[in-house]
DNA sequence: GCCAACGTTGGC
DNA sequence: GCCAACGTTGGC
């Protein structure tokens, strides 16, 4: 299983909206960046991801699961753009802020810290474990 | 609201 | 294929 991080401005699409979609989930449409798209193409059903609120909050607020492999993005007419579907699994008992990530030396290589602009990014198993620990989350 | 970092576009 | 111009993202 691989780990990822999905960024969204809560003004546009928030964790609460994601949770409201339930087990069906929702397509992660609207991504217009090749790097981010390529990561989505690499995703498998069952892969886990962090749901991160950019701009407002600037924190990891929950854990999601990939529930549909990459398919054409319904928000675009251009077949170049594809996206996966994700569904909410659980919220973080303690939101993990960007500040906390920056202060933890174990996360110094994390893409969230090194490239703040990439909206879909890979997370290593080690980084995954650290953030779960910081967020008080067990079993994910 | 500002601006640095980054990605994309398009003229040459 | 280079690179200047432009647009967007997102932290501060």
Image (spheres, coloured by chain):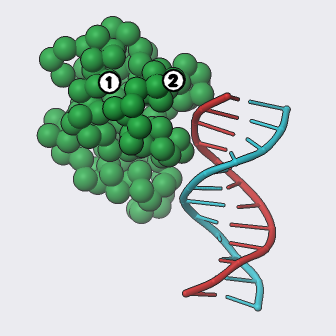
Chain colours: A green, B cyan, C red
Q: Residues within 10 Å of mark 2 (few under 14, many from 20)?
A: few
Secondary structure under badge 1? helix
Residue drawn at 46 percent across, 25 percent down: A103
The quadrant holding residue A111 is: top left
Q: Residues within 10 Å of mark 1 (few under 14, many from 20)?
A: many
Q: Is residue A11 left or right of residue A69?
A: right
Determine whether label 1 and label 2 are within 8 Å by CB. no
Going from the N terminus, do you reach mark 1 or mark 2 first? 2
Residue drawn at 32 percent across, 49 percent down: A40
Secondary structure under badge 2? helix
Give the chain of mark 1.
A
Residue drawn at 54 percent across, 45 percent down: A117
- In x, y percent, where is residue A28? 39, 39
The quadrant holding residue A132 is: top left
Residue at which label 2 appears? A99
Disc number placed over residue A47 in the picture, else none: none
B12 in relation to A22, above or below: below
- In x, y percent, where is residue A89? 25, 20
- In x, y percent, where is residue C11? 60, 32
Residue drawn at 14 percent across, 40 percent down: A1
Residue A83 in view, yes or no: yes
Quadrant where the image shows the C terminus of chain A: top left
| C-alpha separation, residue under disc 1 versus residue under disc 2 | 12 Å
Give the chain of mark 2.
A
Residue A26 in view, yes or no: no
Q: Is residue A25 left or right of residue A67?
A: right
Disc number placed over residue A131 in the picture, else none: 1
Q: Looking at the image, which residue sits at the far top?
A: A93
B3 or A42, which lies in front? B3
């Amino acid at each position: 299983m691989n780990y990822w991080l999905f960024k969204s401005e809560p003004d546009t699409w928030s964790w609460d909206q994601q949770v409201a979609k339930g087990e069906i989930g929702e397509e992660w449409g609207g991504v217009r960046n090749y790097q981010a798209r390529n990561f989505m193409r690499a995703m498998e059903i069952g892969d886990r991801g962090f749901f991160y609120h950019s701009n407002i909050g600037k924190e990891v607020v929950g854990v999601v699961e990939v529930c549909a492999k990459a398919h054409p993005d319904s928000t675009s007419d251009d077949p170049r753009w594809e996206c996966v579907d994700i569904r909410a699994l659980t919220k973080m008992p303690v939101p993990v802020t960007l500040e906390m990530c920056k202060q933890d030396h174990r996360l110094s290589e994390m893409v969230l810290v090194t490239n703040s602009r990439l909206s879909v990014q890979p997370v290593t198993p080690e980084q995954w474990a650290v953030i779960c620990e910081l967020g008080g989350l067990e079993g994910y």
